[in-house]
Each structure stands twice: as structure tokens, then as C-alpha cells.
Amino acid sequence: MKITSVEAYWVHIPIPHERQHVSDFGRTLSFDGTLVRIDTACGLTGWGEAKAQVGGMAQNQALTSMINDEFAPLLKGEDPRDITRLWETLYNGSRGHYALREGRVFPVLGRRGITVSAISGIDCALWDIAGKSLGVPVWRLLGGRRAEKMPAYASGGWAGPDKIGEQLLGYVASGGFGAVKMRVGIIDGDPRHSATRVHAAREALGPEIGLMCDAHGTMSVAEAKRFCRLVEDCNLAWFEEPVTADDKPGQAQVRATTDIPIASGESEFTRHDFRDLAVLGAVDIMQPDLAICGGITEAMRISAIASAFNLKLAPHLWAGAPAFAAGLHVAAASPAGFIVEYSLGANPLLHDLVEESFPVEDGMIAVPDRPGLGITMREDFLAKHTVPR
């Protein structure tokens, strides 16, 4: 089995105005991603996904070019089942032979950013091929799934204080969700305004529905501490990305002053970032994004860190179908995995890109038992929305 081609596509899908939402990232005008296709001589094809930024709307030229022009030539002719060797080769660059020989990393400059995002998309596609080659789902290769279904929470929540309760109750009704997530932070202007919205949400939801808050890293340490005090009676399931990912010690300060669980990780790259979060005592719930963190290979390493520190794992799944499926497989196979994210914003890369769907019933989502990632690409849809090179 040999790799014959590696090709990345920047997919750009405009969002109809009536389905656009406004957050601290701005108005979401489109959903964008870089999809990775790897073909083999034996006829198997694997699909993966990489992200240029956490939000769905991004310029993906550089990321797509990196895969097509820098990594693709290195992968052609290789055995796609040598996933660990290929990961270390791409991460360590010209010093990859040292890393493989010595058993430790020798990375070049690209230890973060789009280099690791590019590896993420490639890695997920390689795992897709590995599963298809054996006729088994990826979770089987990761040690098996802990359950046939995983709890899911509805992710959205941008409405003001007068509408946030109605919006979140609509999420609950749409799939029987037992937990929902809303956005707070700089979009509200002040922590007390965020707290007002949270109190309105809790009043509408009642005490039994789980409620998470996500600040997208937009609060200062002082603001995050203040917000936690203002909502301490709301029984939050977690407070996500209270401060910028560049201030891990600051996030540790926030965690030390509240009993609200702190979640983060969607803006982090590789196990090294997550190790730092754990060692600093900055997190309760780790949220690697499979299209950013280094793919399935690295997510399982991150999962081991979470388990070793008695932390939880809840992958960030605001993504297209390949990264969503990859995160679902990892969450199901990880001993630290306990819940998955399900975006309620407009997401055509999740719902329209593949033949399969990911329905949520009674707040649970089935872990697919189809080979590989369990997705079938609609290549006509892909071709229609690919940005020309």
C-alpha cells in the first residue's frame, strides 16, 4: 500500500444572511475549511480536515498551499499505515531522522500554527485509510469505544438577555439535549452584562439542564474572576476559554479562585501545550480540536495527559464532517472522554458535505461503526465550493 497523491482543497461556503450569527469573531459570512484527500495505489481514499483558525470563517490559502506544495511531495510513495513515523517526519522536518532514531522531538520552527494544522488534516486522512484497509472504524484501532453512544451538548447561544432563554430552550427541544453552551465575554462589553445573560439563561432552562459558557479567550484575568463571582449561583458545567491561550498562568489564576470547572484547548497545538495546561493547574476539561491540535495521533496523546492528571476530555467539534467524526472517535475511545460538542450555528461542512448524518436523539449521538472515519464525501458538493488554486 503506497500513497499516490495528496491534495488539499480550500472549501468556502457562504452562509445565508438569515442564518448568520454575530460573535466576537464578527459576523459569520461563510464556513471555510481545508479538506485533505489522500489516495493510495490500492484504491483506498482517506479524508481529513485542517483549520486556519478556530472560527469557521478563515482565509485558507497558506494552509492549503502548505499541504499541497510542502507536505504532499514528502508523502508520495510512503505507506499510509506508518502513521506515527509520518507524523514525526512532518513535525520534525529535515531533522525527522533524528527524532525517529532518538525517540524525542527535534522540531523546526513550525511547532505551532498552520504547520500543525496541516499535519492534523493529513493525520486524520491517514487514520481514515487505516480503518478502511482493515474494514473497521477508527475507534476500533484506538482501543475500542467505551459506549455505542456519547452525550452531546448543543453549542451556540449568542442572543441577548431577553432572547437567550428562548434560544437555548430551542436547542434543547431540537435534539433532546441535556446541556447547552452560550457565548459570553467581549461581545457583552462587561462581565456584569455577560452575567445578566447567564442568569436569564439559567432561569429559562431550570436547574436540570447543563449550562456552559464560552468567552473565546476574550476576558482579562480580572474580568474572568469577576464573572465567575457574578455567576457562582448558576451551577455552570464549565467556563470555557476565560482568557487568551497565550496566558496559561493567568488561566490558572482564574481556576484557583473559583469552583466552576475551567475548559480550554481549542486554540492549542500538540501535547506540549496541553501538558503545560495540566502542569500549571489551568484546566479541568481539555478541548483539543482535531483539525488544529495535530490530528487523531496527537489527540490520543493529549487524552493520555488528561487521564494521567484526572482531567476530562471534550473535543472541540465546531468543524466539518471529517474533523467532527475524528473527534467523535477519539472521545469514544478515550478514558477521559465524556461529552461531545454539536454546533447549532450554520455548518454546511458538517451537514451537507458528506452522505451520512450525525443525528442527536435524546441528547445522545451514535458513534459510527462504519470503516475508517465513517464518512462518504459528496464530491460534487466539494467541487462546487472549492476555491480555485
Image: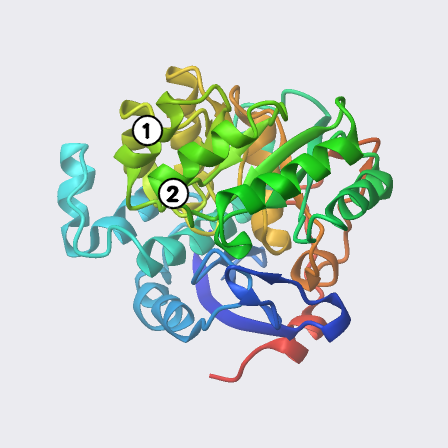
Residue 158 seen in the figure: yes
Q: Quadrant of residue 255?
A: top left
The residue that appears at 35% across and 60% down in the rendered structure is: 114
Q: Residue at x 56, y 56 (%)?
A: 47
In the rendered image, the residue lying farthest to the right is 173
Q: Is residue 40 visible?
A: no
- Is residue 244 found left or right of 159 in the rendered image? left
Which mark is drawn over residue 154? none
Crowdedness near tag 2: few (<14), some (14–19) or many (≥20) residues, C-alpha within 10 Å? many
Task: Tell me the residue at 79%/35% (across/down).
Answer: 204
Q: Earlier in the sequence, mark 1 or mark 2?
A: 2
**What numbered label is drawn on residue 243?**
2
Classed neighbour count for the residue bearing mark 1: other residues with Cα under 10 Å, few (<14), some (14–19), many (≥20): many
Residue 389: x percent and y percent? 46, 83
Question: What amino acid type is highlighted by mark number 1?
Answer: Ala
Of residues 114 and 127, which is closer to you in this image? 114
For this rendering, which residue is in front, 97 or 234?
234
Please name the residue that numbered disc 1 is placed on: 252
